Amino acid sequence: MGQVPKQSLIHIGQIGGARGLRGEVKVQLWSHNPDSLECGSVYILRRGAEPELKTIARIRGSRKGWFLQFDDVNNRTDAERLRGSEIAVEPDQLRELEDGEYFHYQLIGLRVIDIQGELLGAVVDVRENPGHDLLIIEHQGKQSLVPMVEAFVRDIDLEKGTLCLQPIEGLLDG
């Protein structure tokens, strides 16, 4: 199937385990939006030292989550071997974003500054939430959840590596 690319990979989910007898696997996506998955596309599965390239044959969603069938996984035993594998893609496989939209990996690591330019901390993670994403910001050794809404997040500059925050009292108290 070819060699695994050397460039940076974007992790989009993880395989939880086998479902049924025909090789289907349950996946936990890091996004509630499955736009990053497409039948016929090749994905990188990373578990241990040797990543594998796999092609998705089928995608199915239900109330219990997302299920995938890979071209070359046809039984439960083979599907169980994939348990715990991270699903990754090359950056050019991701959908194009609208203005003001960001992938989580773009936000993690940004320096957080206030509107005067003073350093407050850094974005260490992003959690999806039904209403809006939550930024996990490390500030003075503590982590705080900050809603990613215009009232707090004033600007994001990926080139400068900064996220400008308008904090209110107690927002970064952990």
Image (cartoon, rainbow, N blue to C red):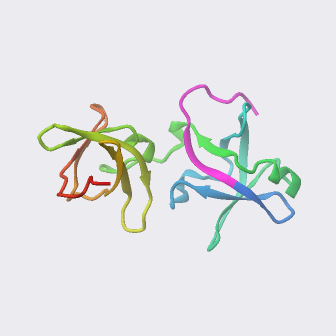
Residue at 53% x, 31% y: name it.
8
Viewport quadrant of the C terminus: bottom left
Looking at the rendering, the stretch of residues picked out in magenta corresponds to: 1-15
Magenta stretch: residue 7 in it?
A: yes
Locate residue 105, reporting x and y percent: 45, 42
Q: Quadrant of residue 120?
A: top left
- Magenta-drawn stretch, dominant element (helix, strand or loop): loop
Residue 96 visible in this rendered orientation of the protein:
no
Viewport quadrant of the N terminus: top right
Report the side of 150 relative to 105 (left or right). Answer: left
Residue closer to the observer: 26 or 59: 26
Q: Quadrant of residue 140?
A: top left
Residue at 67% x, 42% y: name it.
42
Note whether 81 is above or below 61 in the view shown: above
Locate residue 80, reporting x and y percent: 81, 53
Locate residue 102, reporting x and y percent: 38, 47
Report the side of 117 relative to 51 (left or right). Answer: left
Note whether 52 is above or below 154 in the view shown: above
User: What is the count of numbered marks?
Assistant: 0
Residue closer to the observer: 140 or 83: 140
Q: Residue furthest left?
A: 116
Q: Residue furthest bottom?
A: 63
Residue 52 visible in this rendered orientation of the protein:
yes
Residue closer to the observer: 138 or 89: 138
Locate residue 156, reporting x and y percent: 27, 43
Residue closer to the observer: 87 or 145: 145
Residue at 79% x, 49% y: name it.
71
Magenta stretch: residue 55 in it?
A: no
